[in-house]
Every structure is written in structure tokens, then in C-alpha cells.
Amino acid sequence: MNNTIKNPKDHDFIRTEENYLFCVIGYIHPENRIISYLKYVPNITGKWKLNLPESEGDGKKRIIPLMRVLNHYSAEQVLKSYDILLYDYLKYVYDCPISKIKITAVPHNAIKEYYQPQEKIKSLINLYNKNNLDKLQIKTIKFIDFLSENSQIKTSNFGVTGSILTNTHNITFSDIDLTVHGRMNSQVIENVVLELFEGNNNEISRLNPKEAEDWRNNKMKYFNFTKTEANLLYERKWNMGNFRGTRFSIHPIRTDEEILEKYGDLEFNPKGIVEIEGIVTQDANSMFLPCKYDISDVKILKGPRVDDIIQICSYEGLYCSMVRKGESFRARGKLEEVIDNKNNRTYHRLLIGSYLAKSRDYLLPIFN
């Protein structure tokens, strides 16, 4: 394949020479590498199946069972997956000079196949017209049509990620993981989905009571939240639910025109763990991953004393669209000095989703 990938985006997928599957993280990547986390690896007990192209199997179809690397998704779990790569595949571990940490970043020359959500939808629509899809793929197309009809957003602005993107899905248990491309489109879809939830629509609904309880218990277990906090988090999650009985998620994705930063524009120096309170002054970038909030009136509760913390950045998707402009918040995370080489300035930010915080970082709205 052409090993030069133009503008890799969050939730694209990569298949490597070893048939490892990586999920792309964010939009800012070093030259000749793509920052991503390891999601699936070959394993004879795996429940997912990778169908290799006939060109890679001496003219015969070859199916490889895959297992998921992470028991649950969190930034700490992603960092733990590095252990697998450090043991066998050091080439995927990258000492990032701008963030001063080790990350997983797939070299372009190790990419066997690159998967893009919007291109996958085009392919599925073509196969749908030929009556050559399984029932989960058909439901994916129906779901996009449903959202398009209710939002007036063209189907070309949607994509599909996860196991359906890589054609490794299992029709008995796999979810539908959609992408919607562009800030305005994402805002419209958020409003439409919330209206449909409130309208008791027959096609789309929030998680059923058991699923919702499992979701809350999971956040309480892995993120140390109280029941009240887990309930608040659940109430603010607009982008997950069920479509005709199948679990779904929706992920806003930046367009090429909305990617304004390049690797090296910002550098980060770790300064320890900090706990703060403040007010959100801008939440326009909170729907994307990593999500970002501009903040003011910051009060440091614990940790290093600095007077210029002006942003929260989270690599935990849990906190996307979690706090709204004008709301007060409490947060805990890694304090970073930010050197902005593009605009020749320096400030501090709070980062959520670092190994240093060990899943004890958080962001929650607070109400008086």
C-alpha cells in the first residue's frame, strides 16, 4: 500500500504486518508515524475474526481470530498495553519529544492496511445496493439513513469505526460505532439525538436500565466515582444508546479544514498532579478527542501553585461534552507547562488521561 497517510484522524484504524489492529488517537502525529493504541491482536481464542484479502493468502481466504487487548477503555489501560509492545515490538513504542512520555506510534512503513470510516461507508453502501451485507452492516446503513433523515445531514458526512470498519465484527454482539465529520454536523447530531431520546422514539433510545446500571458501575469501579457522580456522567452522555436493539456510539471527528495544529507547535513539560476548581469559558472543542476546555477563575486545591492554568485537555473520551460553557467545575489531573512555539507564549494546562494520574484524574461540573 501507499505508506504515506494524509491527515490521519481520530478513530481511523491501522493493520500492521503482524495483523495487530491499532486505533488512531487524535489528529497531531509525528512525521512518518501515527499515534494510536493497540486494540486487537491475533489469538486463537479470540471472538473477533480478521478476514485477510485473498492476495495475502496465496489466492485463498484466510481468517485470523483476534482478541481485544484492553478489558475496558481508559487512558491508563492504553498505557498498560505498551507492555505488550515493549516485550515484542519495540518499533511501535515512541519516545515523544514534545510530550516527554512514551507513546505507541505506528511507523508508516509498518502499515499493511489503513481503514478510514467515511470510505468504509461508501463501500458498505455499494455492497448494500448489491444485497451483499450481513444484518449488522445493514443496520449500520439504516442507522445512518435514520440520522441523516432526522438531521438533514448528508450520509457522506458519516462514517463507521470499530470492528465494522475493519470487517472483524461479530453479528451476535458487536456494536455500531459511528463517526460524524465536522463541528457543525456534530453539533446538529447531538441536538437531534437528544431530541429523539426525549421524544421516546421507537427506533432510537438511551441504554436500557440494566445497560445503564452496568455503565455506571463500570465508571465507579475503574474511575473511583461515587454513585451520584456516575449518574451525572451518564445523564450528560448524548452519544451512546440503542438503535433497533443494537448498542451504538457516535464520535465527532474534525475535518481536514478543522485541523489547525501540527506536531511540534506545542511542547509539554510535566509539573506533577494538581486538583483545581474554576469556570469553563469555552467548550467548542469539547466534543472532539482529545477534548479541550478553556477555563478561568482557577483555584488550586492541591498541587503546584501556578497562576496561568487556562485549559483542560482530556484524552479520556468520557469527558467529551461533559461540562458546559459558564459552568463551574472541579478537576484533577497532570499539570503541564505548555510551550506554544507557534504563538511564542507559555502557559499551563491540566491534562486528563495520563499514566501519572493512574485513573484518579477527573472532570465534573459542580453546582452550588
Image: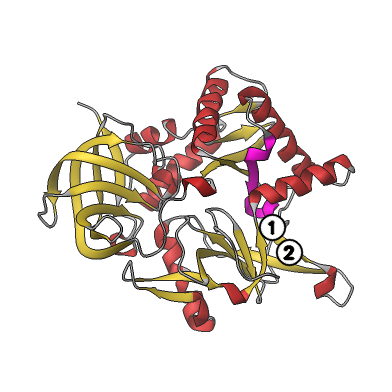
Q: Earlier in the sequence, mark 2 or mark 1?
A: 2
> Measured along the vertical axis of the image, is residue 145 above or below residue 266?
above
Seen in the image, is 69 located left or right of residue 312? Answer: right
Which callout, 2 or 1, points to the residue nearer the camera? 1
Local crowd size for mark 1, using a 10 Å CA cut-off: few (<14), some (14–19), many (≥20): many
Q: Amino acid at mark 2?
A: Leu
Percent coordinates x, y for residue 146 in the rendering: 69, 28
In this orientation, which residue lies closer to the viewer: 14 or 238? 14
Residue 117 is labelled as none
Q: CA distance from mark 2 to mark 1?
A: 8 Å
In this orientation, which residue lies closer to the viewer: 266 or 72? 266
Q: Which residue is mark 2?
A: 50
Local crowd size for mark 2, using a 10 Å CA cut-off: few (<14), some (14–19), many (≥20): many
Q: Amino acid at mark 1?
A: Thr
Find residue 335 and report its image quarter.
bottom left
> Measured along the vertical axis of the image, is residue 116 above or below residue 179?
below
| Residue in the picture at 75% in, 43% down | 136
Query: In the current view of this chain or complex, which residue is farthest to the front?
Result: 343
SS assignment at label 2: strand
Percent coordinates x, y for residue 359 in the rendering: 34, 56
Percent coordinates x, y for residue 23 in the rendering: 56, 60
Find residue 336 and report its image quarter.
bottom left
SS assignment at label 1: loop
From which residue to which does the magenta span run? Answer: 155-166
Q: Split into 4 quadrants, where in the image is the C terminus?
A: top left
Colour approach in the figure: secondary structure
Percent coordinates x, y for residue 134 in the rendering: 82, 46
| Residue in the picture at 66% in, 54% down | 163
Find residue 261 and report its image quarter.
bottom left
> Measured along the vertical axis of the image, is residue 366 above or below residue 33?
above
Q: Split into 4 quadrants, where in the image is the N terminus?
A: bottom right
Residue 166 is labelled as 1
